[in-house]
Amino acid sequence: MEHKAKSIRPFIGAENFELSRSFYRDPGFDESILSNNMSYFKTQGIGFYLQDAYVKDWIDNTMVFLEVEDVSLYWKELLALNLTNKYKNVKLIPIREQDWGRECFLHDPSGILWHFGEFYK
């Protein structure tokens, strides 16, 4: 195949769409409202679609990996946002060392698991 891919944009759901919209704006994702039940969130040219759709099995099995330059800095920034006190069901899991690099984790208000990772060079 000779086409050149430009982006990949996963679709994720939300149990409470308005709450999740607020949650994703807090860490600095820019929101573009596409309709009354879908928004596009981006940061530095990459992003995802958030939709007002909740299927428990789907949400409970959704994971998103975001590669970051410095996971220690990203972790400190996540802690400073106080997301676990501001949003019910949000969980932060500290940095773990893996064979391939380091990562920390964040569960959004609906239960979607975000991995924020830095690969070893």
Image: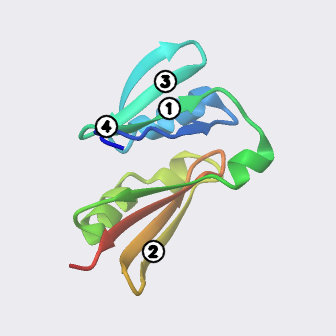
Characterize the local packing of mark 1: few (<14), some (14-19) or many (20 or more) Cα atoms within 10 angstroms.
some
Among numbered discs 1 and 2, the one appearing first in the sequence: 1
Residue at the limit of the structure toward the front, as seen here: 1
Q: CA distance from mark 4 to mark 2?
A: 39 Å
Q: Nearer the viewer, mark 1 or mark 4?
A: 4
Residue identified by numbered label 4: 3
Characterize the local packing of mark 3: few (<14), some (14-19) or many (20 or more) Cα atoms within 10 angstroms.
many
Left or right of 41, for residue 28: left
Q: Nearer the viewer, mark 1 or mark 2?
A: 1
Vertical side of 15 occupied by 111: above or below: below
Q: Nearer the viewer, mark 3 or mark 2?
A: 3
Residue drawn where x is 73% and y is 46% of the image: 58
Residue drawn where x is 45% and y is 17% of the image: 33
Residue identified by numbered label 1: 49
Q: Which mark is residue 94?
A: 2
Characterize the local packing of mark 2: few (<14), some (14-19) or many (20 or more) Cα atoms within 10 angstroms.
some
- Callout 1: helix, strand or loop? strand
Residue identified by numbered label 3: 39
The answer to whether mark 3 and mark 1 are in CB contact below 8 A is yes
Q: Which mark is residue 66?
A: none
Callout 3, which amino acid? Ser
